[in-house]
Structure formats: structure tokens, C-alpha cells
Amino acid sequence: MRIAIIGAGVSGSFLASMLNSKGHEVEVFEGAKKEDHFPVCAWGTCKKMLDHYSKLAGLDFDNYVLHIGKRVEMRLPNGDKEYLNCLGLVTYHKQRWEEDLLNGIKMNYGIRCSLDNFPLHKYDYILDCTGFHRSMLPRVDDFIVPAYEYMVDNAPHDEFYIIGYKNATGYFWYFPLSNNKAFVGAGDINKRYHGIKEFFDENKGIRIIRKIGRPIRITPPTRMEPFNYKNVIGVGESIGCVFPLLGEGIIPSLICSEILLDSIDANGIDLKYYRSNVIKRFKYYDDVYRVVRLLISKEFNKIKHMNLLYSMYRNMKREEARFGFEISLNKLSKMLRSLQY
Ligand SMILES: Cc1cc2nc3c(=O)[nH]c(=O)nc-3n(C[C@H](O)[C@H](O)[C@H](O)COP(=O)(O)OP(=O)(O)OC[C@H]3O[C@@H](n4cnc5c(N)ncnc54)[C@H](O)[C@@H]3O)c2cc1C
């Protein structure tokens, strides 16, 4: 098949590599210029899952790992601290990983594609891998969290920590990289980004390497239809594959990409199969999304919303190995209690 991939992020680069190796004619269009292209992300993920996806694409993930976490410190809004043991939580060199996947692929940088300017008829399929932008699909009334971060040098800590905001409006993160570098950032629907100014006030020797940002979509796939338009198919964050409680989208986008690859048969891409499997796989993200929205609107009630809470916990526990940190009902309840403090 002739396939155009719009967006050279996580799903775009992974799919380009996989589809190319299966013999399809692949061409990638990336909006940023080659020299400016940089993944806006804190590069935190689960090693076990990235081992799997890297292996599928012929890469050795060990070559990209920057920091292996031991435990995540969570500073809660009521002043408490909680610690989550890591089960493979790492940061990795996401930029190099994506560049290596794109090795040997026909690339077009600096082209911002849209439905108005793209020659849809030249390809069998166009994959919208534009993440938050969803540039090639109809608009959806969705929910996004503004976010930005700094990549810094002379970083003072060598472990993950986060500061949760009251009513789950967002959180501050500190993600260590290697060689004293780290990402320091925050997502916050109120755009106050508590923790960032305080971090720089407390740590005077920090050198800022770059500042980047964009909003994160936390609307789940169940609320992001349509997944396709004409011969365009959305993959990854463009159709809501982000875990809503954390704004974590690397692994969900890769899971979605794998579903797309499984949907290919002798006739092309089986859209019915793709749609139903994406909905099925990410169904419980809808419950997580509802918990987050209820917390934000201060309507969450532990008794009234017990089913939602339990669904979130049960599904997260089932997927514990994919998150990269322990999932504990006790700690989750404590965290939710504190967010409502
Ligand atoms: C500040 C921040 C920190 C984050 N940290 C983490 C984290 O630590 N761990 C985690 O799992 N997730 C994190 N996320 C979320 C995660 O980065 C995304 O959900 C994930 O990268 C989505 O993958 P994708 O392939 O769908 O899109 P992306 O990886 O976002 O790639 C989209 C690509 O499309 C390009 N593009 C956009 N519009 C066009 C256009 N019109 N034409 C051509 N190209 C276009 C973009 O330039 C980009 O290269 C973070 C997000 C943000 C904003």
C-alpha cells in the first residue's frame, strides 16, 4: 500500500518503521523543520513495554534508557508525601529513538499538513499521527490540559518526583535524565503551574537548555470519534490514546499503533476491526476520565462513584506491569483523598 504518515512523533515514527519493514510504500510528513524537530514530552515511560516495541522495530531499547527509577515521590496537596515503588519506570532518549526508527524512511520536514492542502488521492491511506493537533480529522469538542516544561542541566535530584494539584487540575513533574539533566514541568488546567517557579527559586545553579510546551489531550478514544475521514485514519493522541489521570501517552499511542498494524489484511486496513479494538482496549480510560472530571468539578464522591473508582483501580492493577510503578488501592485512595483536601 501507499501510505502517508502525518507527524513524526511516537506513533508516526513507529508505524513508519513497521510498515516500511512489511514492504509498504511509506512517506512521512512532519510539520517541524528537521533542525527544530524535538519531542515535546518528559520522556518518562515503562521499560518493559518499550523493550517490546523497540524489539518489534529492530531496536535495542537499552541503548536509549537514560534513568532507571527506584521510587516516585508524590507530594500531595494536603502536605503528605507518598512513595510509589518503580517497576521499570525509566526516562529514555525519545528524540534519538524516533530518529532511529525513521532511518531509511522517505521524510518531508517543514510541511504542516491539513485536509485543505494534502493530496489525499495520491495515497491508499493517510495516518493522522499529529497527536494533540489532530490536523487531518474533523474537530471534536475535547478536554485538554495546558502544559510546558524545561530541559535543565545541573539538576539537583536523581529521582522522579511530582507535586499533585488540588482537585486533580494537574501536577508538577521532575523527571531525571542522564548526566545531571532533567525535565521540570507542569500541566495545569488553571495555568498556574505551581512548583516551577519555586523549583528555580530553590535551585539557583540550574541551567535551562530549552523550554517547550503544548497542551495534552486527556479525552479518551470513546469520546474522540470519528477515528477516520475519507482515507485518513487517526492513530495515537489524535484519537485520545492518553491515560487521563497522568497525561501519559507514549505507551497508549504505541498500543494504538499496534492495533492499527493488526488491522491490516489482504484488502487493506479493516476500519471496523480497528475502531472496535481501539474502543475495547481503551474503554476503561473513559472511567478514569470521568473520575478526573468529577475531581476537577469537585463533584467526586467516594461512595457515589465507588464503581468508577473500583473500575479505575482494577484495570490499572491488571495493567500494573505496563505502568512501570506499583498500583496500590491504599495509595490510590490516599492520593484521591488528598486531592479533595
Ligand atoms: C509537556 C508534555 C510532557 C509529556 N510527558 C510525557 C511522559 O513523560 N510520558 C508519556 O508517556 N507521555 C507524555 N506526554 C504525552 C505524550 O508525549 C504524547 O501523548 C505522545 O507523544 C503522543 O504520541 P503521538 O504519536 O500521538 O503524537 P506526538 O508524539 O505528539 O507527535 C505528533 C507529531 O506530529 C507533528 N505534527 C503536528 N501537526 C502536524 C501537521 N499539521 N503536519 C505535520 N506534522 C504535524 C508534530 O510536530 C509531532 O512531531 C507529555 C506531553 C506533554 C505535552
Image (tube, rainbow, N blue to C red):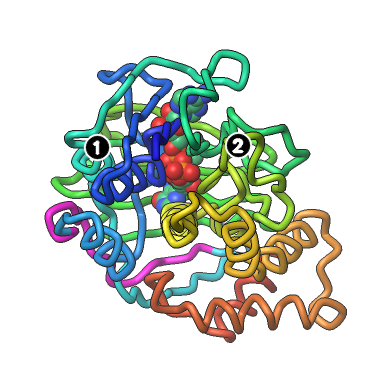
Label 1: few (<14), some (14–19) or many (≥20) C-alpha neighbours in 10 Å = many
Q: Is residue 121 above or below residue 178?
A: above
Numbered mark located on residue 102 in the image: 1
From the viewer's perspective, tell me whether residue 236 is left or right of residue 284: left
Label 2: few (<14), some (14–19) or many (≥20) C-alpha neighbours in 10 Å = some
From the viewer's perspective, tell me whether residue 99 is left or right of residue 31: left
Q: State the residue at coordinates (61%, 72%).
A: 335
Whether residue 185 is visible: no
Give the distance between the C-alpha atoms of the residues marked 2 and 1, in whole angstroms.
Answer: 29 Å
Query: Does residue 70 show up magenta in the picture?
Result: yes
Q: Which residues are magenta?
A: 61-75
> What is the secondary structure assignment of the residue under circle 2?
loop
Give the image quarter of residue 116: top right
- Tell me, yes or no, whether the two marked residues, 2 and 1, touch with CB atoms within 8 Å: no
From the viewer's perspective, tell me whether residue 64 is left or right of residue 72: left
Q: Quadrant of ligand 1?
A: top left
Q: State the residue at coordinates (66%, 70%).
A: 284
Which of labels 2 and 1 is toward the front?
1
Considering depth in this image, is 17 or 220 the residue closer to the camera? 17
Numbered mark located on residue 146 in the image: 2
Q: Name the amino acid type tagged 2.
A: Pro
Quadrant location, the N terminus: top left
Quadrant location, the C terminus: bottom right
Q: State the residue at coordinates (60%, 53%).
A: 271
Q: Earlier in the sequence, mark 2 or mark 1?
A: 1
Give the image quarter of residue 62: bottom left
Numbered mark located on residue 70 in the image: none
Considering depth in this image, is 337 or 103 the residue closer to the camera? 103
Query: Does residue 239 show up magenta in the picture?
Result: no
